[in-house]
């Protein structure tokens, strides 16, 4: 019996580390996606921010955040270090969502300061309420919300922080005209966008599959496989539906929108991929893709400048995916639509308000936004002293 327990322990430890490794592939995924969507004069700055987020957020979570979220390091089913590494892999993704949406005008140092606070305090508090030691248990605000891998805990949290950041920092210079028009700023490197999106897609298999928590029994192995299959299905549906919308609306197949549609479907399924049959994710992912299409134009009408579409992909679909669990997987006891809605609202209010206050204070101390001439020249020169494409003439 002891030998069997040891085998299970080793298998689950390896599974957690393998899933963690897939999630870390999302670091270059976000970096390539964002680097391809911004103008060439800002590519190095985007890559610097993504690198900084992984390093700073992970260390903040190690030193402070994990204890807030879960208490002491420990696990009975796998190595406690593997359990930590898996949770650590998530933390940077919250801030990646936020940083991408303020690309091309946000400075690196104040983003680093916010990364410390988000990775060390804000995000761990949300994890505590949902996956962790639960300081709200037994109170009115107790989050009776099912969120397997973080449609709300990670994606909406990043989306709410991004919304606060955009309100503090404003839009890119020239993005919106006085007459109410929108200046189109095309992607600078579509191959990088495609590479980044597929790295994220692959990373999602560790993101959601690893969140099942075990693979050392027949039942848990089946649960992991179903979770990964449903995750992939939702991404497929999101991509296909957005492709159809683009063709019927504009007679064009916009690859950047199609890829964001896939990512929207992946965000939407993240709350409950282990709960659905093999067909429900098609509907959930398809609706996720539709939300991306209409979300992009909706936020532009509100003059909320989001170069990578993160509000549409992560905020809207984080909310949709969490509510979808209450619609399609409610058991009337542990999972209810009201409980899912309550979780969305409580997390949204807390993250938005706290993030806005923190960003407002940071902005007073170290301005978040680059000066207009710095923004015009590009953040690569001012922030990094190194251009990603020095042989190219930069487009202003």
Image: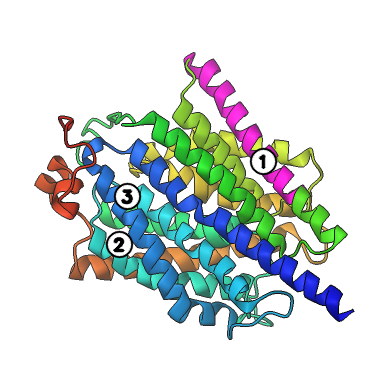
Q: Which of the two residues, 218 or 182, is positioned nearer the viewer here? A: 218
Q: Main secondary structure of the magenta part?
A: helix
Q: Quadrant of the N terminus?
A: bottom right
Pointer 3: residues within 10 angstroms few (<14), some, or many (20+)? many
- Residue 129 position (above or below residue 18): below
For this view, does 319 lie left or right of residue 2? left
Give the residues drawn in magenta, as a range.
Answer: 226-251
Indicate whether residue 280 is drawn in magenta: no
Indicate whether residue 237 is drawn in magenta: yes
The furthest residue to the right: 1
Q: Earlier in the sequence, mark 2 or mark 1?
A: 2
Measured in 3D between alpha carbons, the distance from the residue under mark 2 to the one under mark 1, in whole angstroms, is 32 Å
Measured in 3D between alpha carbons, the distance from the residue under mark 2 to the one under mark 3, in whole angstroms, is 13 Å
Q: Quadrant of residue 69?
A: bottom right
Q: Quadrant of the C terminus?
A: top left
Residue 136, percent from left and from top:
62, 80
- Residue 124 position (above or below residue 275): below
Residue 243, percent from left and from top:
56, 24
Q: Given this view, does label 2 or label 3 mark the residue nearer the observer?
A: 3
The furthest residue to the front: 3
Q: Tell me what residue is drawn at x 71 percent, y 37 percent.
A: 283
Q: Label 2, on which residue?
A: 111
For this view, does 222 lie left or right of residue 130? right
Marking on residue 47: 3
Q: Earlier in the sequence, mark 1 or mark 3?
A: 3
Measured in 3D between alpha carbons, the distance from the residue under mark 1 to the one under mark 3, in whole angstroms, is 27 Å
Q: Tell me what residue is drawn at x 62 percent, y 58 percent.
A: 19
Q: Earlier in the sequence, mark 2 or mark 3?
A: 3
Q: Label 1, on which residue?
A: 232
């Amino acid at each position: 019996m002891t030998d069997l327990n040891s085998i299970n322990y080793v298998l689950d430890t390896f599974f957690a580390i393998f899933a963690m490794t897939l999630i870390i592939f999302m670091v270059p995924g976000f970096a390539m996606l964002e680097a391809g969507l911004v103008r060439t004069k800002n590519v190095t700055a985007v890559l610097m921010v993504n690198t900084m987020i992984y390093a700073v957020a992970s260390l903040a979570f190690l030193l402070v955040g994990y204890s807030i979220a879960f208490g002491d390091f420990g696990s009975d089913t796998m190595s406690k270090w593997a359990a930590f590494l898996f949770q650590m892999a998530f933390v940077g993704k919250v801030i990646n969502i936020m940083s991408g949406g303020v690309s091309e005008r946000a400075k690196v140092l104040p983003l680093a300061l916010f990364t410390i606070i988000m990775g060390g305090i804000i995000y761990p508090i949300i994890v505590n309420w949902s996956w962790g030691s639960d300081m709200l248990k037994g109170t009115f605000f107790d989050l009776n919300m099912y969120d397997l891998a973080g449609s709300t805990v990670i994606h909406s949290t990043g989306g709410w922080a991004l919304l606060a950041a955009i309100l503090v920092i404003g839009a890119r210079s020239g993005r919106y005209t006085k007459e109410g028009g929108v200046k189109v700023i095309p992607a600078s490197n579509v191959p990088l966008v495609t590479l980044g999106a597929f790295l994220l897609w692959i990373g999602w298999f560790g993101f959601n599959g690893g969140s099942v928590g075990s693979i050392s029994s027949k039942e848990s192995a089946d649960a992991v496989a179903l979770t990964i299959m449903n995750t992939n299905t939702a991404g497929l549906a999101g991509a296909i539906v957005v492709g159809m919308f683009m063709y019927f609306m504009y007679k064009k197949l916009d690859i950047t929108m199609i890829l964001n549609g896939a990512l929207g479907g992946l965000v939407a399924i993240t709350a409950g991929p282990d709960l659905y049959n093999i067909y429900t994710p098609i509907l959930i992912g398809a609706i996720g893709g539709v939300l991306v299409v209409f979300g992009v134009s909706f936020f532009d009408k509100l003059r909320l400048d989001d170069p990578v579409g993160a509000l549409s992909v992560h905020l809207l679909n984080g909310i949709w995916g969490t509510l979808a669990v209450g619609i399609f997987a409610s058991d009337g006891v542990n999972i209810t639509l009201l409980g899912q809605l309550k979780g969305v609202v409580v997390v949204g209010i807390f993250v938005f308000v706290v993030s806005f206050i923190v960003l407002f204070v940071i902005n007073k101390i170290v301005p978040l936004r680059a000066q207009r001439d710095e923004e015009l020249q590009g953040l690569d020169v001012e922030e990094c002293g190194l251009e990603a494409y020095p042989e190219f003439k930069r487009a202003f």
